[in-house]
Image (cartoon, grey):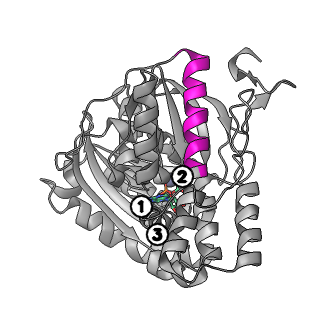
Amino acid sequence: MRVLGIESSCDETAAAVVTDQGEVLADVVASQIATHGPYGGIVPELASRAHIRAIIPVIHEALSGIPGGLAGVDAIAVTRGPGLVGSLLVGVQVAKALAWSLDKPLVGVNHLDGHLFAIYLQRRESDEPTSVPKMPHISLLVSGGHTALYRVEGFSDVVLLAQTRDDAAGEAFDKAAKLLGLGYPGGPVIDELAARGQADAFSFPLPMASRKTLDFSFSGLKTALARHVQQAGVPKDEQTLANLCASFQGIIVESLVRKSLLACEREAIDQLVITGGVAANRGLRASAKVACDKNRITLFVPPPISCTDNAAMIAMAAVHRLADGESDDLSFAVYSRDPDRRRGKFRADGTLVDHKSE
Ligand code: KG4
Ligand code: ZN
């Protein structure tokens, strides 16, 4: 079975073809960074228009090497949310039109499931290990819009353990980069600078340091950086700037790694997946590896190309439903927020109330 995946939830227009074994046959991503860069963040109206321009050429390119082109595809998967509604509508309407005209099954995919199951993609060109985690495992999903910990029981059984109380980690990177005049998106440029800096040069408070909670919080850290910049200004020399980035990134990484290990401990699970755009961060990948080795936890991180938004992960997330003969009615709607996995509930002592037992 070959699945055509379509992704347009945010600022990437993407199409991919993936087999039911997770093999990536085609993977095309058209980025809108140049469009949004001058604004220091995504402008929704511009994003929708850019998706409309890009979506057909991107799908064409993804199908160009597939025998039979569109006819060689057995099903279509498309991101239906969460994301920017105007952006989502572009991908969803094109996917519906294709499914209807070709009479092929269509599955609407939760974008977060895409990130969670990206680890099962098999990319031939990747030199990273292709071993995949068993179920259940813990997954840290860390992106521009989300930062959350899940217990992944199966392809359609995902339990939210905790998430950020305010900003997502990627958002913190992006806002910090804007403050420091480093452009958009902030993650890759801070990652680059941090690699040349000293993480102990500046001290920032570790958010949600208590072991009582698995929650994250990054808005206080952003405020601490803003206060620092207000008082000391943006560092003029490259080394001080690199040190500031390393210190800021170091705290985010420490928070992410600590809570992920705590989740593994609490759930008595020794497999951890880290996924989403921020999982491309070299500092996070390196720290998580050291901490997991020390705690005898097997770490799985997709290659960077599978971490940031792509359509292969959307096709992957649909494969199991399609294999079970499931598909969606063509009248399904898009959603801007995740309808199933809202903020987790916590007891007064900070421990999580499992939503299944509620
Ligand atoms: O998963 P993604 O592509 O889109 C969302 O679903 O949000 O994640 C985008 C986020 C942005 O905030 C970007 O700054 C961050 O991922 N990011 C990184 C790196 N590459 C992308 N953050 C830190 N280090 C990176 N190397
Ligand atoms: Zn994403």
In depth, the one of 323 and 307 nearer the eye is: 307
Inspect this view and state whether residue 185 appears.
no
Q: Disc 2 to disc 1, how far (Cα)?
A: 20 Å
Where disc 1 sits, the SS reads loop
Q: Does the residue labelled 2 lie within 8 Å of ligand 1?
A: yes
Say what amino acid the circle numbered 3 marks. Val
- Quadrant of the image occupied by residue 289: top left
Answer above or below: position of 181 versus 285: below
- Quadrant of the image occupied by residue 123: top left
Where disc 3 sits, the SS reads helix
- Please give left or right for residue 19 compared with residue 281 in the image: left
Q: Disc 2 to disc 3, how far (Cα)?
A: 15 Å
Say what amino acid the circle numbered 2 marks. Ser
Q: Disc 1 to disc 3, how far (Cα)?
A: 10 Å
Q: Residue 189 carries which label?
A: 3
User: Where does the N terminus fall, quadrant-wise?
Assistant: top left
Q: Could you tell which of marks 2 and 1 lies nearer the N-terminus?
A: 2
Residue indicated by mark 2: 143
Answer above or below: position of 31 versus 257: below
In magenta, the rendered stretch is 251-268
Q: Does the residue labelled 1 lie within 8 Å of ligand 1?
A: no
